[in-house]
Image (tube, rainbow, N blue to C red):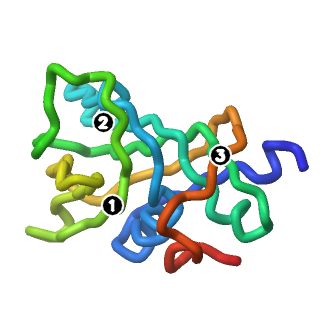
Amino acid sequence: MPETETALKLIALDEEDLAIISAHVQDSCVQSEELTYLPSQKRFVLAAMRYDWSAAAAGRHERVGSVLRFDRVLKVAQIGLSPPDRAATLNLLAVSFEETDAPSGLVTLAFFGGAAVRLEVECLEGELRDIGPRREAEVCLGHDEPPKGVAR
């Protein structure tokens, strides 16, 4: 199957949309240096090798290069990330949104080991897009079933 047929492009404008994106990015490998805040554009971008849970349900264990982007970002805070270790590989566990003063709120990207990135946003506006390449991956340890929200 050509890569373009399996490439994801998901948009999040509310918590329900973001929960679907969160399920698809669970266990993504992220290099610390691939976390980028562009304050003049009010944009936060994260590049990752996403574990393809849909492919796993079909018996293929693959990772695909993906970009997770949030717009209308006012401020970024990092917890538990060490600036000197910019080449460290992080395991993205979940992405969530907490509304503070509608429609603004906080987007939290939670990583294995307790690290997190918190985005203060005017409103929730995010996108997950597969950009390639697609590579064979080892089975994600500790996960026999796809996350809730990912179709079999």
Residue type for callout 3? Ala
Spatial CA span between label 2 and label 1 = 16 Å
Query: Given contact means CB atoms under 8 Å apart, are the residues at marks 2 and 1 in contact?
Result: no
Q: Which residue is mark 2?
A: 43
Q: Residues within 10 Å of mark 3 (few under 14, many from 20)?
A: some
Residue type for callout 1? Val
Q: Position of residue 97 (x, y in %)?
A: 25, 66
Q: Residue at x 70, y 38 (%)?
A: 135
Quarter of the image that includes the C terminus = bottom right
**Label whose residue precedes the other's in the sequence (2 or 3):** 2
Residue type for callout 2? Arg
Residue 19's place in the image compared with 115, above or below, is below
Q: Residue at x 28, y 52 (%)?
A: 111
Query: Given contact means CB atoms under 8 Å apart, are the residues at marks 3 and 1 in contact?
Result: no
Q: Which residue is mark 3?
A: 137
Nearest to the observer: residue 106 or residue 74: 106
**Label whose residue precedes the other's in the sequence (3 or 1):** 1
Q: Residue at x 38, y 31 (%)?
A: 31
Q: Position of residue 105 (x, y in %)?
A: 16, 62
